Amino acid sequence: MHAGHRRFHQLWTTRAFELVEPPVTALIVDDDDALAEALAQALAAGGLQATTALGGGAAIRATQHWTPHIVVLDIQMPGCDGFQVARAFRTSPRLVLVPIIAHTSLAEREIIERGKAAGIDAYCRKGNSPRALLRLIAHLTPTPPPHLGST
């Protein structure tokens, strides 16, 4: 593939997203604990509050009584993969509109059809700078402009 045609992050949906009051809360779902923790630290450095869930089952349990603003979801996980997690979230009234980003080492062309069918909103390739992921999160969780101080 020609380098100019490689895409590392892509929006899959055209729906509008609600404004989010900062701080933006993110749920990072991955079966690699070290990678999830490193990503959580990178998102925290970008101003987000990040929580990790080790695998799909843990993600579903974590959201039983808590609703994140956004989900960063690995696809290849044992037991309950990212597509199953996304479908479960889309059946929950509280999570149906929460943006989901597929964060995977799989190429976009390999998962886009199943991802869209499962309700995933966007794709970001693992292994790239967290800046691309942070830009995508900012697009999917817009925050209101800062209030001007009164004089």
Image: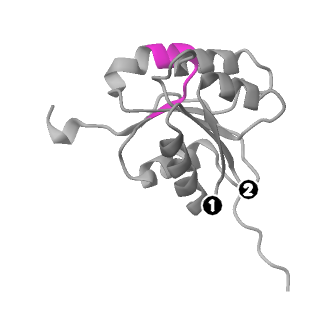
Q: Nearer the viewer, residue 69 or 144?
A: 69
**On residue 27, which mark appears?**
none
**On residue 47, which mark appears?**
1
Residue 1 shown left or right of residue 34 in the figure: left
| Colouring method of the image | one colour
The quadrant in which the C terminus is found is bottom right
Where is 137 relative to 43, above or below? above
Please name the amino acid that badge 1 sits on.
Gly
Q: Position of residue 4 (x, y in %)?
A: 19, 41
Secondary structure of the residue carrying numbered label 1: loop
Q: Nearer the viewer, residue 34 or 128?
A: 34
- Residue located at (68% from left, 32% from top): 98
User: Residue beneath label 2, please?
Assistant: 22
- Residue located at (66% from left, 22% from top): 57
Q: Is 137 included in the stretch rendered in magenta? A: no
Where is 72 relative to 44, above or below? above
Where is 54 relative to 92, above or below? below
- Determine whether label 1 and label 2 are within 8 Å by CB: yes
Span shown in magenta: 114-123
Please name the amino acid that badge 2 sits on.
Pro
Q: Nearer the viewer, residue 75 or 8?
A: 75
What is the crowding at mark 1: few (fewer than 14 residues within 10 Å), some, or many (at least 20)? Answer: some
Q: Position of residue 39 (x, y in %)?
A: 51, 49
Residue 104 shown left or right of residue 149 in the figure: left
What is the crowding at mark 2: few (fewer than 14 residues within 10 Å), some, or many (at least 20)? Answer: some
Secondary structure of the residue carrying numbered label 2: loop
Query: First in sequence: mark 1 or mark 2?
Result: 2
Q: Position of residue 13 (x, y in %)?
A: 52, 28
Where is 91 relative to 135, above or below? above
Residue at the far bottom in the pictured view: 151
The quadrant in which the N terminus is found is top left
